[in-house]
Amino acid sequence: MLLVEARGAIERDAPIDLSEYADVIGQLRGKNYSFGRIADWLAERLGRAINKGGVFRVYQTWEIEQKYAAEEIDFSPSEPPDDEEETDRLILKIAEEVRSAAVDSVANQSLPEFFADEGILRAAAIIEQERADERAADDADKATESPKTENDGSNKPN
């Protein structure tokens, strides 16, 4: 009996993955619902408190995915496009969208625009540090690999 009750409590207290409701959030934003109103709408139907900041973040991701889907851009996560100009165009577009999202985010939090730019710069520094750490780890792995030598018989001990 207690086990059944505990399982119910776990399911009831588990966080809701709002990304499952991204299309719903997108539809409601299309009808000019505010993020707070959408959070209330979802909370009423799901029976759980919903954070409007979480709704906002899901909407940002959904909106970007919709833009890319509308343009039919196919991204391969491991390979950039062969065309350098196309790569630059796509990267610039993403950078503009990141800045726009950051500016919107700080505006929604009533913070000065400075925080948007500073947040982007710090995120870039974190990414660069992670890349440097990955390169250092790769270099360390290569240094510890034993060199492979071909045995042609000339290296036999006397």
Image (cartoon, rainbow, N blue to C red):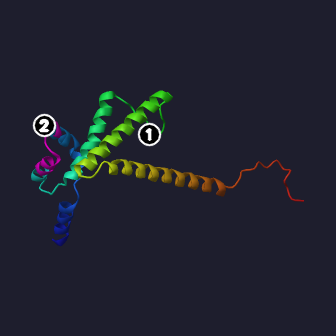
Instruction: Reply above or below: 135 against 13.
Output: above
Q: Is residue 124 left or right of residue 51?
A: right
Q: Considering the image in quadrants, where does the C terminus appear?
A: bottom right
First in sequence, mark 2 or 1: give its number. Answer: 2
Q: Is residue 33 left or right of residue 110?
A: left
Instruction: Give the camera-side residue of 40 and 92.
Output: 92
Residue 36 in magenta stretch: yes
Tell me the residue that label 2 is attached to: 31
Amino acid type indicated by mark 1? Pro
**Quarter of the image where one finds residue 90:** top left
Tell me the residue that label 1 is attached to: 77
Category of crowding for the residue at label 2, using alpha-carbon neighbours closer than 10 angstroms: few (below 14), some (14–19), many (at least 20): few
Category of crowding for the residue at label 1, using alpha-carbon neighbours closer than 10 angstroms: few (below 14), some (14–19), many (at least 20): few
The residue positioned 42% from the left and 49% from the top of the image is 121
Q: What secondary structure characterizes most of the magenta part?
A: helix
Mark 2 and mark 1: span between their CA atoms? 33 Å
Range of magenta residues: 29-41
Instruction: Give the camera-side residue of 124 and 42.
Output: 124
The residue positioned 38% from the left and 34% from the top of the image is 93
The answer to whether residue 84 is visible is: yes
The residue positioned 34% from the left and 28% from the top of the image is 72
